[in-house]
Image: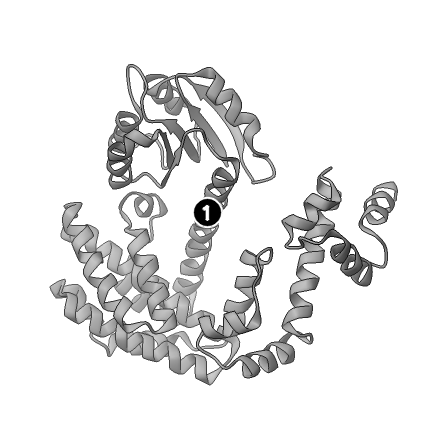
Amino acid sequence: MKVLLVDDEPVITQGLKILVDWEKEGFEIAGCVENGVEALKFLEKNPVDLILTDIRMPECNGLELLNQVKTRELSDAFFIIMSGYDEFDYVKQAIHMGCLDYLLKPVDAAELVGILRKIREKEQQRNEDEKRLAELEKASGHTNLISKLIGTFDSKALQKIILSEVLDRLIRAVEVGDQTEITEAVHDFWQEGKEREFTEETMDFNVSYLLFQLIRLASEQDDEINHEEIMRFISESSFEESVKTGNQNYMASFLLEYADYISQLRQRTGNGVLKAVEREIKEHYAENISLRELSRKFFINNAYLGQMFKKQYGVSFKDYLTDYRIKEAARMLLSTDRKIISIAEEVGYKDSDYFVQKFIERMGCTPSQYRRGTKQS
């Protein structure tokens, strides 16, 4: 993903270049400019995926740049604003205008990396959404119904008008069956649309996108689920009424019904929970995660989840997590020159001796032997 750095202090942009390993995180610096005017000229000729800009600059500040890019439709890039502690009112305006996140100066490397990874996840999700919708529309016998309910999926339009934060809350609340959160998030959804003065058509697009994500959620519970069943449930529920009237109560009622439906699918098959656990491992393997914590998170008995996991993957949760960590460590050993103790911490081991012990158990050699032997071969 290409990045444009915008700051009137060259020392800042030069510092940002070396602050993090951009390539490792999947990014490359496409350009550095000193103000919003130069940024606009750059964007007229060069596509980028992320704009990291200071908020106070001469000629054209960060807010004006954000507004111009959105108004002139110059780029669909994610925006990150850099600001000082005394500029938080500007930051709130930027977030309201569609800025993804902000960083306080001086920029912290770990915080920046965290935001970059969040952007990569959003980009990956966007690509998966497009692919999944294409697959759904091609499904025999479902095209007309899906097209009627979802309409045409436009990723560019989605970036500009989707209320992603509150919709993510809604989807998550439905997934875990949190009735209170569903009701509150529905209220916030309509309230935010009103505050941003979204048209009825724009709100319909958001509702359609929500529906699409709910279809995806149901599909994730069971790979072999019949899409006809999902669409039949939706068509027989209060969904269409909620769309027609824009009524919060109708939407909340539909989502509460759908949460029960997801719960029933989950009871029918453990695949949905196991996929969620697998996703948690991939996203948080370096953290101190445990089967007990995940069982509480997904509202399932700890012992039963452990049995299902071992039956599905052939190993215990603990061994699966260890294998995943060691696999990531092996990848880092070959793709970077970082010290072994640093890699151990990166994959979740604070005790480097324990890390070496686990690495030997899995790979048959020490980390240094693995790096040396593989590179020589």
Residue 106 x %, y % = 44, 29
Total of numbered circles in the picture?
1
User: Residue 140 appears in which quarter of the rendering?
Assistant: bottom left
Of 59 and 242, nearer the camera is 59
Residue 99 x %, y % = 32, 38
Above or below 136: residue 345: above
The scheme the figure's colours follow is one colour
Left or right: residue 210 compared with residue 104: left
Instruction: Give the residue at mark 1.
Output: 118
Residue 255 x %, y % = 27, 71
Residue 115 x %, y % = 45, 42
Left or right: residue 55 compared with residue 195: right
Of 170 and 111, nearer the camera is 111
The residue sitting at 73% across, 40% down in the picture is 339
Left or right: residue 356 compared with residue 64: right
Of 236 and 112, nearer the camera is 112
Q: Quadrant of the C terminus?
A: top right
Tell me the amino acid under the disc marked 1: Lys
Q: Residues within 10 Å of mark 1 (few under 14, many from 20)?
A: few
The residue sitting at 34% across, 43% down in the picture is 156
Of 223 and 360, nearer the camera is 360
The residue sitting at 18% across, 51% down in the picture is 193
| Residue 360, visible in the rendered structure | yes
Numbered disc 1: secondary structure: helix
